[in-house]
Image (cartoon, rainbow, N blue to C red):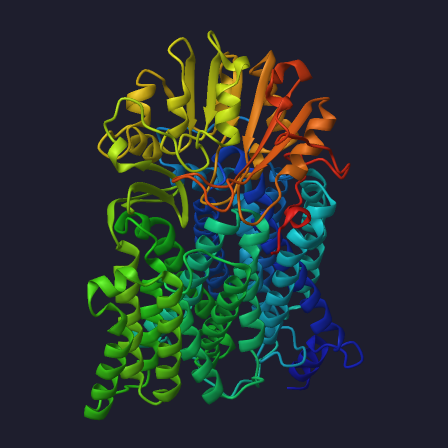
Amino acid sequence: MFAQADKKQANKPASQWRWLIPVLFTSTIFLSASLLFFVQPLFAKLVLPHIGGAPAVWTTAMLFFQTVLIAGYLYAHLSTKYLPVKAQIGVHLALWALALFFLPLSVPDTWSYDPNASPALQTLVLFALGVGLPFAVLSANAPLIQSWYAKSGGPSADDPYFLYGASNLGSLIALLAFPLAAEPLLGATTIGWGWAMGFVVLGAGLLISGLTAQGDVPVVSTKTFTVPSAKSIAWWLALAFVPSSLMLALTTKLSQDLGSVPLIWVLPLSLYLVTFVVAFRDKMIVGPATLKVAFLASLALIAAAFSGLAAPAMTWTLSGLLLLAFFVVATYAHRKLYETRPESSGLTLFYVIMSVGGALGGLFNSILAPALFDQIQEGRVTVLIAAGLLFAGGARLSPRQGYIGLAAALIVLSPLIGSKTYVQMTAQTLGTLTVILLIASLVLLRRAPMAISVALVSVTIVGALHTQGDAIHRDRSFFGTHRIFNGDEMRLYANGTTVHGAQFIEDIGAERPRPLFYYHENGPMAQVLTAPRAGEGHSVGIVGLGIGALACYAQPSQDWHFYEIDPTVDRIARTPELFSFVTTCTPNAPTHLGDARIVLEQQNLSFDTLVIDAYSSDSVPVHLTTLEALEVYLDRLDDNGVLVFHISNRYYDVSLPLGRAAEALGLTAYIQDYNPGEEPEAGDTRSLVVMMARNEAAFGTLTQDPRWEPLNSDSKRIWTDDFADLLSIMVWN
């Protein structure tokens, strides 16, 4: 008896050193989580030049990360269930050592993009080859380390969930550090080596933490873990699904308009992680009643925004409000997860189920939604599922609640009464009215979950009708959503929420359709393509097909080539019933599918004029504006050729990095900020264009036009594939 007591006493950590145990475990899990979430934007950034700048790249990447997270959590669960602690340490460190062969992280040299294969599948394969094993090792650390701490004899060993808060705090700091500190100051190569060093240091932390765990030390617990019921599992899955799916839907919406770049990606993900830090604790800052009301109001705003009613496109203000609303909704769901968590012996299984729920959100947004919907509808669907969380606990619909819900639905739907009234109302007016009415209804009806849900369903229906509008064609691809609709006298094409081209309806089938909007005959793009230097015998390359409006500046003797990453765009441009620019003016001009940089590098063509007019919704892909990109373009440009960039957008001054690159390459550059005036011709709009050449003479008479001004460099750091700082070129007004 005494010998057994002495053995237990020997295994118990000395009291004077006991405080170091949580410090050790907290530091290790903090470092692991930091590496786990730092690598996500890092590797996605490395992938962009190979896949293109579509928002779906990040969404698909998140599906990969969430799927591997399941594998990591499942491995941790099985390891802690069937292996002794020493064996767990040995197996895990062996996997860690094997992952070292993946460092430093990079895109495999043997990998190349195939435009004929599924972009989503190729993205998943690329991530698996490049970062699969290191990420899998990192993903298993959180449950493993918490399980080891439960056997360490340290303070609060019976409830190690506090380490989850430290894990998410590390994740948050890492996510924010990448776009706000690492990316603006360091190149991707330097960042990658720093990450590799952190991964090496982590191995020591894992070894010491594992050895500190004492498998024979009893953990005092007042709870007895039982296998969760199917109802509990379904509840956990739903609570994990909603924030994950909503985060991805919001990321897609922001990326469409603000840019598919790490800075935009990490904002929703960072808030997602913060909600775990806030929710996974004993006491909340706000009470459950306040959180519920905030949850309802936030759902109202998100429903209106995803329905296209709050604004036709994102603004910085609306983006901030949506991020705040998402934070509230995710906090509500994660708090419900924390309140229903099992005791520590069920910890690893709980995390497995949570990760499956999160991955289901990624699967729905990345794979199922694009296959099911021709526009981005997943946000609306998730809002309705989130509204269903109100029914937890067996809420029932009383007659009074039914009447109130019907009234709320009628109020929300009232703007639609009379189709003419609806069509005549602007999106902003309709959206403002809807948001006000819906939020008012939610505050008044906060005790009527069924009525509230009816109201949310109603606003979603309104949004579906609003989005559809007069659309004559809708489609969706990996690279974006496409909608074609008729205006008063024009047929318009929208990619995401941005109109990218238009054609007079009366010109469809005409002998020579008139280019409109950014390509109007009065604008800078037309000036470059019709100047004397672009006469007979010139070859022209157009990167970014759109609806092919530029095609109607082609001369019979010219050789035109189009470059387009999205086959859907090419089909739209070459369907004469929709738009007739290409089929009428350049019917024999080929379209080279794939990312233009990669395709141009593989070809041996040369151009007198090369136009870069590629967009993802409203944003210009960063990898098409770097120094390396310009070097590729110059390799395909004749000595007296002209390189043209169309950079019109709402949020970034892309002329700044272009000016720096032009100076570094010894090019002469001009810029024109074209403004058609207060009473422009029909279809004439503002546009911003930069042109470059190896010598002044290549521009011909263009520079005699005072509207073209020299583009001077601000002498700041040059953008490369390794380094690009979007914060420095943001336009905040």
Q: Quadrant of residue 14?
A: bottom right
Location of residue 713 in the rendering, given as x and y in whole percent from the top left corner: 74, 34
Location of residue 439 in the rendering, given as x and y in whole percent from the top left corner: 39, 79
- Residue 275 seen in the figure: yes
Quarter of the figure that contains the C terminus:
bottom right
Give the residue displayed 24% in from the left and 51% down from the top.
470
Quarter of the figure that contains the N terminus:
bottom right
- Residue 241 seen in the figure: no
Judging depth in this view, the residue of 337 and 270 nearest the camera is: 270
Q: Quadrant of residue 364?
A: bottom left
195 vs 534, left or right, is right
| Vertical placement of residue 192 versus 114, above or below | below
Location of residue 142 in the rendering, given as x and y in whole percent from the top left corner: 57, 63
Judging depth in this view, the residue of 305 and 262 nearest the camera is: 305
Give the residue displayed 53% in from the left and 40% down from the top.
620
Give the residue displayed 42% in from the left and 19% down from the top.
561
| Vertical placement of residue 81 versus 678, above or below | below
Give the residue displayed 61% in from the left and 40% down from the top.
654
Location of residue 310 in the rendering, given as x and y in whole percent from the top left corner: 41, 65
